[in-house]
Every structure is written in structure tokens, then in C-alpha cells.
Amino acid sequence: ILDFGIAKLAGATTLTRAGSLLGTPAYMSPEQAFDDEVDARTDLWSLGAVIYEMAAGRRPFRGEREQAVLYSLLHADPEPLARLRPEAPPELDRVVGRLLMKDPAQRYQSAAEVIDDLQALARSALGDHPRHPRHPQQGPSLGQAAGGVRGGPPQGAIELLQDPRAEAPTETSPAAPRIAAERRQLTVLRCDLLLARADGGALDADDLPEVLHELVPDLDRVWSQAVGRFAGYIDRRFASGLLVYFGYPAAHEDDSRRAVYTALAIRAAIAELSARCEQERQVRLEMRAGIHTGLMVGAMPGTTVHGQLAQGAPPAAAEHLLRLAEPGAVVVSEATRQLIESFFATENMGPVRLPGTRHEQSAWRVDRESGAETRL
């Protein structure tokens, strides 16, 4: 019998203990921490935590106390392996990231799938590459496009890209399966929920998991209604927040406006929910949001998506804007503001440097709708 909470790095703190939780928090999945129903996918989460620690030399979710670790695994994403270990294969970062998806439905669904990807990664690391070179008409790989391609398509255009794992067919070999991806403009909404005591004090970390667990049905209703109303695509659900794309699977001329309308609708719904929580639980709720519009590379509509829908800088930019937002605020980038400025009253928050951009640009706080019906 092996308890990963016993084997530890020198100087690290082990959090296995008898009491309220059965398991080691540093390797515990969100559903196990919430005392929800668990299955084999919980073990795959733990496997991801172990692989991450082996590669990075530290755990993906850390804290000095048990509740701090639980808060981290429920609310935070681990620092990418590519940043901690630049020499590590990028595919390893993708595999570990999928293992550590907070939503079990977005993780690997079986150990066999993990084995397949790890074996492919091992073959690639050992130099067992496809014998046939990329067909000259295939264009850039998915990874090249995510890193930026000069002379990209104009706004609204779609560029088909070839998955780099697909081998070019030859006369003597059957056509290899191709995973189609496309490059398109999306608007990214990243919103988060903030909790505090109704009297204005900080909420005790020991009470946080229980409070969030009780709020899950109400939050799911708020997220689903607001996002569904404006035809957004929920890519990731966090314990207290969302990552939403507008412009997928169908693009609309007003996708940036739809993202802002969604954020404002969520803010209004959270305000109503907060009034009830203050009476019933003595807890006050507030939301904040960051929104950015830019080009991304992702799966074509109709493609089965495992893990994140798309890759590119816009989600990181939206996350950066989220961190700038005060409680209750909706903050948008300059790129988004240019698409919505006639429809919303905004206030300049000053220059910021967003991930994936070379120059500073203004961040804007959205105060309210302007009442305008057209851009004119």
C-alpha cells in the first residue's frame, strides 16, 4: 500500500491526516474534495498530479494548510510545465493539462487513452517520427499556428490547418486520419465568483468548500441561462467561474457584444443570489469578468472536443483582465471595446500589457448599456 502523502520532497509538508477528508488533498480531485460521486477518472486526476510533480519538481496545487490546498485545486490552474521546464516536450504539457481538468467529462475517460498518448509521446521523444514529410500543401501545423503565423487571414476569415500528428498519405499507405482545426476570431469571457462574509469580513477558508458545494446548483443555473441566452460556448467550468467563447460553433457579427451582455446578465443574477445568501448563509457574493477578442486556433464545429476547445493568447489575455477587475466589474480589452463602444458606457482604466501582445493598450471598465441600437 503506497500513500503519496508519505513520500515527499525534503522540506515539503504532507497533508494526509485522519478526520474530515479521506485522501491526500495534494492529489485529490475536485469531485473527491466536494464529496461528490467519484469513478476511475478521479485516479486519472491523481496520476496527472504525480506526473506534474515528477516533471516540475513541485506539486501542481500547493498551500501551507489543507484548506489552502483545497482552495487552490478548486479555483486555480497549475502553472504550465512549459514555463517551469521549457525543455519538456509540449505534448507532455497537453497530456498533464487534460489529466488535471477540473471537470471529469473533459479529462481522459480511460487509462487506455492516457497510455496511447504517453506512448506516442515516448516515440516522438525517441525520434520515431513519420517517415513521410509534411505535404507542401498542408500548410502550417496546429502548433505553428497557435504560436502565430505571419500574414494570417483577415478578420472573420477561416484558415484550415492540419493536425501535426497526421501523416501525409502516399500511394502505398492508406490516408491517415486528419483532425481538422481552424483559425478564427473569438471573443473570450472569463468570469469568477468572489465570496466574503455578509459583515464584510473574509470568509474562513475552512468553510469555503462547503459553501461552494451548496452553491453549485444555483451557479450552474446562472451560468447556463446567461451563456445560453447569448449563444456562448462554455469551454471550462471552474469551482466558481467559467471560460466561455463567443463565435463558436457559429460566428455572429455581434459576438463581442454578446460576451458583454452575458457578463452583465451574470452580474445581475449573482446580485440576486447574493441577497438570498446573505440572509440564509451570511455570505455575500460578487462576480468579476475579463473579456478579450482575438484570433485563436481550435477544433472545427462538429468535431469531438477533448480538453480545451482552442489554443492561443486570448484566454490568457481575458484572465489578465479578470485579475484587474474589482469585485462587480467587467473589464474589456481595447480590441473588444472597439467592437462594442457604441453600445456600452465604458471608462478607461489605463494602459496594460496583455499576454500575446507587443504593445501596451488600454483596459476599459464597462459600466452599463448605452441604450444605442446601432453603431451609428
Image (cartoon, rainbow, N blue to C red):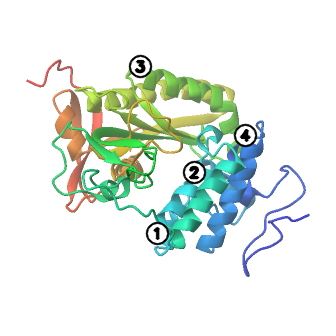
Dot 4 alpha-carbon crowd within 10 angstroms: few under 14, some 14 to 19, many 20 or more: few
Tell me how many marks there are: 4
CA–CA distance between discs 2 and 4? 26 Å
Would you name the residue on which mark 2 appears?
A: 98
SS state under label 3: helix
SS state under label 1: helix
Q: Which residue is drawn at 36% across and 32% down?
A: 248
User: Are dots 2 and 4 in contact, CB under 8 Å?
Assistant: no
Looking at the picture, tell me which residue is in the foreground, 237 or 90. 90
N-term mark: 2 or 4: 2
CA–CA distance between discs 4 and 1? 33 Å
Looking at the picture, tell me which residue is in the foreground, 77 or 250. 250
Q: Residue 373: where, in percent of width, then height?
A: 17, 18
Q: Quadrant of the N terminus?
A: bottom right
Q: Residue 79: where, in percent of width, then height?
A: 52, 63
Dot 2 alpha-carbon crowd within 10 angstroms: few under 14, some 14 to 19, many 20 or more: many
Would you name the residue on which mark 3 appears?
A: 229
User: Are dots 2 and 3 in contact, CB under 8 Å?
Assistant: no
N-term mark: 1 or 2: 1
Looking at the picture, tell me which residue is in the foreground, 64 or 92. 92
Amino acid found under the numbered disc labelled 4 = Glu
Dot 1 alpha-carbon crowd within 10 angstroms: few under 14, some 14 to 19, many 20 or more: few
CA–CA distance between discs 2 and 3? 29 Å
| Foreground disc of the pair 4, 3 | 3
Q: In which quarter of the image is the C terminus?
A: top left
